[in-house]
Every structure is written in C-alpha cells, then in structure tokens.
Amino acid sequence: MKFIRNLLDSVKPQFEKGGKLEKWHPAYDAFETLMFVPDTTTKNGVHVRDAMDMKRTMMTVIFAMIPCLLFGMWNVGHQHYLAFGMETTHLDKFIFGAIKVLPIVVVSYAVGLGVEFIFGVIKGHPISEGYLVTGMLIPLTMPVTIPLWMVALGAVFCTLLGKEIFGGTGFNFMNPALLARAFLFFAFPAFMSGEVWTDLSPEAGKTVVDAYSGATNLAVFDTDYTAIQSVSDLFWGFEQGSIGETSVFMILIGAAFLIISGVGSWRIILSVFLGGYLMGLLMNALAPADNLSHSMHMPALNHLLIGSFAFGAVFMATDPVTAAHTQKGKWIYGLLIGAFTVILRVFNPAYPEGMMLSILLFNVFAPLIDHMVVEQHIKKRLKHA
Amino acid sequence: MEHLLSLFIKSIFVENAVFAFFLGMCSFLAVSKKIKTAFGLGLAVVFVMLLTTPLNYVILKYMLGEGALAWIHPSLADVDLTFLSFILFISTIAGAVQLVEMVVEKFAPSLYSALGIFLPLITVNCSILGASLFMQEREYNFAETAVFSLGTGIGFFLAIVLLAAIRERLQYSKVPPALQGLGIAMIVTGLMAIAFLSFSGIKL
C-alpha cells in the first residue's frame, strides 16, 4: 500500500491545477479515491458526514448482488448440462458458467466505465462510482447467450443517454441498467426473447435431449399455468432465465443485506411484493371459470417467484435516484410497480416479462407521484394552520 | 359497454397521442416546464378535444360524408363532400378554442397569462385534429367518438403532466449547456416513449 501511495504522491503535482496533465485530473482522482480514503475536507459550510459515502453505498449493493451472480454462474452450467442430459459435478457446472458469464461482466464494466471516463475527462467532473452497480446489473439481467458486442452497445446507450446526458450519477430519471435492457430488448428482440436462455454450445458426441424446451416459465404460464415448475424449483432458482434473476433465495439474501445496511428502501421492496400479490389475488377472483388453465388462475405467490419479479423489486425498483423520493410516494410507487407487472404478464402476450417495463414506466411516473404527495401534504398542513 | 371501456383505456395508454403517434409535440414540449401550467394546458386540450371531435362527427355524418346530405333532399344522395373535412374540422376546433380562451381569460387570468400564445395555438395542436381524423378514418360511431376523444385528451394530459414533473426534477441536474431546454426535453420524451412501449402489445 505504501508503494502505491508513494507512486500516487509522486505523480500528483502533474495532475493538479497548472500541472502538465491537468486535463486528466478526473482519471487520477478516480484511481486515488479507489485506493485510499480522500484526505480533502469541505472548505465552506458545515456538512453532516458519516462513513456512508457514495462509494460505500455502491459497494454495499454490489456485495448484495454477489450471491445472485455466483448462483447465476452455477445455474448457467446446470441448465447447459441438463439440456445435454449430462451428469457433472457442481464444480464443473460452476466453471462452465463462470467462463460464459465473466466475459459479459468484464465487457459491461470496461465499456461503461470507458464512456464514463471519457465524459469525466472532457467535462472535467470526477468519475463517479454510480456505474459500479449499473455495470453489474446489466450482465445479471441478460440471457447468457447474448453476443458481447450487444452488451457493449447497451452499456454505451445507457451510460450516454440514460445518465451522462443528465449530468451523471444521481441526475438521471430512469434506471440506466433497465434502460440498457429495454433498448436491447426492443432493438434486437431475437436475442432477448424466445429460446435464448440456455447456452447450447455443442458438447462432443452429445445432442440436446428430447425433453429440452427453451421456453421459460414466463412463456409457459401464459398458455397453461399448471405446466410451470414446482414452487421449490422456482424459489431456489433451478429454472431458465436471465443470469441473475432465477434464484429468489439468493435475491432475498441480497435484500436482507440491503435492508439491514439501510441502503435499499424496505418500503419499496415490501410494497412491490405486496402490489404483485394483491393483483395476483384480484386476477384469481376475476379469472374465467370455464378455462382452468388460463393464466389468470395462476396462484398469486407464483407471480412473485417466476421471472425477474424478485430481482426487479430488490435491485431495480429500489434505485434511490429513480424511485419516488417521499416516504408515502415510495409505497404508491412500489404498489403500482407490482400490480402493473402482473397486469402486463397476464394481458400482454407480446412481452412475457412485465417487470422491466413496469419499473421503467413508474420511473417516469415517480416525479409526478412525489409532486402529488408533497402538494397533498401542503394542503393538509394549510388546513390546520 | 366492455368495448367502449377497452377503447377508452386503449386511447389513453396503448395508443397515446404523444408517445405512440408523436402528435401535439409543439405544445407538449413548450408548455411542460412547470406542472401547474402543464396541468392547465392539459385540461384545456381535454376540453377542446371532447367538444370538437363529437361535433366534427355530427358534421361528417350530416354534411360531409358520402350521401350525408340525403336528409335534405333525396337528389343530394350522391354528393360527397369529404374533401372539405380538413377545413371544416379545423374551423370547428378554432371556434372551440376561441371559447376556451374567453373562459380562461375570465376565470383564470393567471393561467391565461402563463399559457400565453400556446392557448390560441391549441387550434393547431395536431393531436386534436388527429383525433377528428382518426374518428373519420376508423369510422367510429357517436358513442365511440365521444369515448375516444375523452381518452385521447386524457392521454395528452397525462403525457404533458408527466413530462412537466420530470422537467421540474431535471432542474437540479447538470445538463450540458448545448442540450438545455428543448434538447433534453426531446431526449426525455424519447426515453418516456420507450417506457410507454410496454403497453404496445396489450390486447383489449
């Protein structure tokens, strides 16, 4: 550590104002703050400070996502060997998955941070840590078969149009990772839906087993809800889907971590689940009695387990920048996301996964929800005055 | 009844005038800086839409459409004045806007001055003429026309209020100088349209 400190100190004057490499100060700053706690203090005014700066917040979210990532790697291998009907050890499965997943993570980080870096240097603002979370969310929401250049394209699109154009981390109004996914979903539907969820790269001397079906539970439940996998499979995550979304158990570990550390809003997480559950019950009540396999009959609990419902609720909807900011607004925001997801799943056959679009839509509504909550509060206070 | 309800929902969300057809962009972008004025303009658009589209329906049905004049005299049955629909539709709209302008000036002078030129410009708001033309093209009956015009109006109202709320929040962001104002509003509109794509496959 001492060596790095010395090295940084020796080149520091070059990057200071008036130095030769003054333009590259954001780059230097990014490295220094990544390695060490910055020694600068605020010069004017009093600020309430604690150890919870943005870097810590972002790292907490990344730690919360690691269980999902590790399980996702194992599941990629599991689904692959399952499709070929091969018996392998857990380690083999994990290694296969890691080889497939890690390049996606690396590309997402390299490209996104690259864009952020260029912007930081051009505009002279410090490179912020916001992309650390986005860069991890993008791979977790992709199918494992996605071409790497598409990941790069999505990362560029979301960093540029989703965030930097509004001034960087903290100023965007839509979740950048979801924006990347939505952009790729609408631009290249063939790579983002259908039978893309299992990696079928050939195994020597093996063919895909007859029982293999590329359809996810989301696609299955639309025609016959009774044909989806068992609740325990759905809960533990032995199903096909985006890399990180399958295991509700791992997501709940992440959720517990986020709630205990105070980084994620429990109001939003709880209300998204509640909204989805209540809408599921309502669907059951309204379901046509003559068609017992109709998707409206699906038990409300299953809605919370399939697809990316849990993942979206815990990691996407809670994004403190794009969610509603007021306490009451968070409840409304979460309930609407959950309810609308179930509506989309049941009534919109074109897009089996409603979670992504539902969160994006209520990102758009969040400022209005906040406005109305504040206005209503003012009105109430005026009455008492 | 169910059919009308689905038409209503469809015209608000699925076929939102702003996000699905990009109609009425000029006032949508220009008057969405503050929620209050956006709210006022949105209401004015809903009102004008609800007034003019059914009125245009009656005009189309009894004056312009093929054989519409037969109620005057049977010999007029083969007269087709549909080519006049554009000019007559827009004059109805202009008349209705005039009415709204007088009402707003009398009862909400502050809103009147806040809206400025954009109040009379509702006349050339494409979403209003668009609603009348869709009504003609899709051959709605009277009940459908009324529901459709209300839905389209509410859709526009929703869109402009949403954009205004986002733009009020964007006041705190550091948008590059070259993009401030209309530039960023255009980009925001595009991103909002992506979110509204979620409705595009819904079958009602």
Image: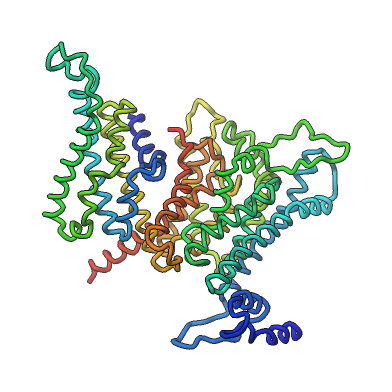
Q: Is residue B58 left or right of residue A281?
A: left
Residue A191 placement (x, y as % from top left): 64, 42
Q: Against A229, is A62 above or below?
A: below
Q: Is residue A249 left or right of residue A339?
A: right
Q: Nearer the viewer, residue A58 or A260?
A: A58
Q: How is the image coloured?
A: rainbow
Which quadrant is the C terminus of chain A positioned in? bottom left
Counting the numbered discs, the total is: 0
Residue A337 placement (x, y as % from top left): 48, 51
At x 45% / y 41%, what residue is drawn?
B199
Which quadrant is the N terminus of chain A positioned in? bottom right
Q: Quadrant of residue B165?
A: bottom left
Residue projecting furthest to the top: B75
Q: Against A156, is B69 above or below?
A: above
Can residue B153 be seen in this snapshot? yes
Residue projecting furthest to the front: A20
Residue projecting furthest to the right: A205
Residue A10 placement (x, y as % from top left): 70, 87
Q: Nearer the viewer, residue A15 or A73?
A: A15
Residue A237 placement (x, y as % from top left): 68, 48
Q: Nearer the viewer, residue B48 or A221?
A: B48
At x 47% / y 50%, what residue is drawn?
A275
At x 36% / y 42%, what residue is drawn?
B17
Can residue A253 be seen in this snapshot? no
At x 88% / y 36%, what residue is drawn?
A205
Q: Against A217, is A149 above or below?
A: below
Q: Quadrant of residue A7?
A: bottom right
Q: Is residue B113 left or right of residue A135?
A: left
